[in-house]
Amino acid sequence: MVTRENFTFSELENWLNERRVTEIECLVPDLTGVARGKILPREKFTEDRGMRLPEAVVAMGVTGEFPEEGPYYDVINPTDRDMHLRPDPRTVRIVPWATDPTAQVIHDCYDKEGRIVPFAPRSVLRRICERYEAEGWKPIVAPELEFYLVARNTDPDIPLKPPKGRSGRAETSRQAYSIDAVNEFDPLFEDVYSYCEQMELNVDTLIHEVGAGQMEINFFHDQPLQLADEVFFFKRTVREAALRHDMFATFMAKPIAGEPGSAMHIHQSIVDLASGRNIFSNEDGSPSREFFWYIGGLQKYIPAAMALFAPYVNSYRRLSRFTAAPINIQWGTDNRTVGIRSPVAGPAARRIENRVIGADANPYVALAATLACGYLGIKNRIEPTPECKGDAYLGDFQLPRSLGEALELLRNEKDLADVLGAEFITVYTEVKEIEYAEFMKVISPWEREHLLLHV
């Protein structure tokens, strides 16, 4: 039986023929998680076609800008050379909202010598997964992704507002876990679940989160690359479905002032390939050394990885005291005030939840970074601090408070560069510096209100 896991190109072609696909969206996730690529007629989509894109396409900022000079061009060739794209047949999905039968396929990026492009986000996640495989391990992850539904807004100077539901009214109070509040958007979510079913996305539960119009979708646990692909597809899907219902879906970390931010909590564990055992548990069911070392790695390296988990200026607005988002790297069991949580679970399901990551993070980069932190913890046998059994919000801030501070920490952390790739870190930090500089050119309403006549 052919499964998606072992799809070959010939089986991909059979899949396309069975569905009478006439068009192919050839996709490459860029640094921001945006889908870049080309659209091809079905007959032009062949294994030996050799489709190409400029390598800088996956290495630009959210504004579409590039550095003018500097270390960026020690990695990106200034002659604007091409990448050679190869489809990953396992990623093929139908595009359920397309008028004509259309498929979407994610591609990996290679240079002309056939080497994988090291700074492409999907390459970075592949790299850390190969590190785990070399140790005889298989990481298992399960993302929980929060997002807001907001009323259509075409003027960036006007604050976002919750959308109107079936009742004709917008939410004016917080409705955490309310079934009725989710039902307000039944027509939208019927489309979302229908699209996800057609795309074979393994989404699990849908809940209403704390914020007005804030939702959360959970994914079934699986291997990191597959889950990153599914989050990538899901974001496209929800945005498209929302537009069809005259609203926006946003994965901004802090879209509405006074409301909680949106996170991408990632549950993670490690399976031993030889025995199939969760290495976070001993034979007697107690937590293993690897479990504690993994936590120790997260604690040591999360501050330096923050620019990967919180990639925009807006990301740091989410990370504030008493707002359902962590402010430090304490860890605890069944404790949602900490940055690193261990949910209550049996030995086979023992796992660690990274609660620091924002919903705005690139899923490939975020998964690669959190797995890298844990990997380094195990390899270097890093012991964690004592477990936090109280309210971690009463402790000190231990995370960077701004993108500029986070970028400085990331540049100076050699261990993460060794694991994730020095080329990637160079490209990423240079691009983020441009975004930060662009933001600093903007004068905010707060500055005009409080500084105009008072300083």
Image (cartoon, grey):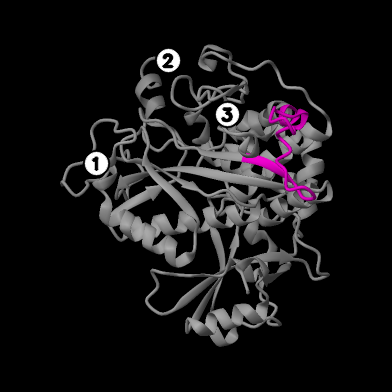
Image location (x, y in percent) of residue 231: 53, 53
Please report the residue visible at 48 percent of the width from the left and 44 percent of the height from the top. Answer: 145
CB within 8 Å, label 1 to label 3? no
**Amino acid on which the number 3 mark rests in the picture:** Ser
Which residue is identified by label 3?
402
CB within 8 Å, label 3 to label 2? no
Magenta run includes residue 309:
no
* Most common SS among magenta residues: loop
- Name the quarter where the N terminus is drawn: bottom right
Which residue is identified by label 1?
180
Please report the residue visible at 52 percent of the width from the left and 30 percent of the height from the top. Answer: 316
For the residue labelled by badge 3, is the local secondary structure a helix, a strand or a loop? loop
For the residue labelled by badge 1, is the local secondary structure a helix, a strand or a loop? helix
In-front residue for pair 48/297? 297
Pointer 3: residues within 10 angstroms few (<14), some, or many (20+)?
Answer: some
In-front residue for pair 327/83? 327
In-front residue for pair 420/158? 420
Q: Which residues are magenta?
A: 268-293
Which residue is identified by label 2?
455
Q: CA distance from mark 2 to mark 1?
A: 49 Å
**Amino acid on which the number 1 mark rests in the picture:** Asp
Q: Which comes before the other along the chain, label 1 or label 3?
A: 1
Please report the residue visible at 40 percent of the width from the left and 30 percent of the height from the top. Answer: 260
Q: Which comes before the other along the chain, label 3 or label 2?
A: 3
Pointer 1: residues within 10 angstroms few (<14), some, or many (20+)?
Answer: few
Describe residue 228's horizontal placement relative to residue 251 as left or right. right
Please report the residue visible at 70 percent of the width from the left and 28 percent of the height from the top. Answer: 287
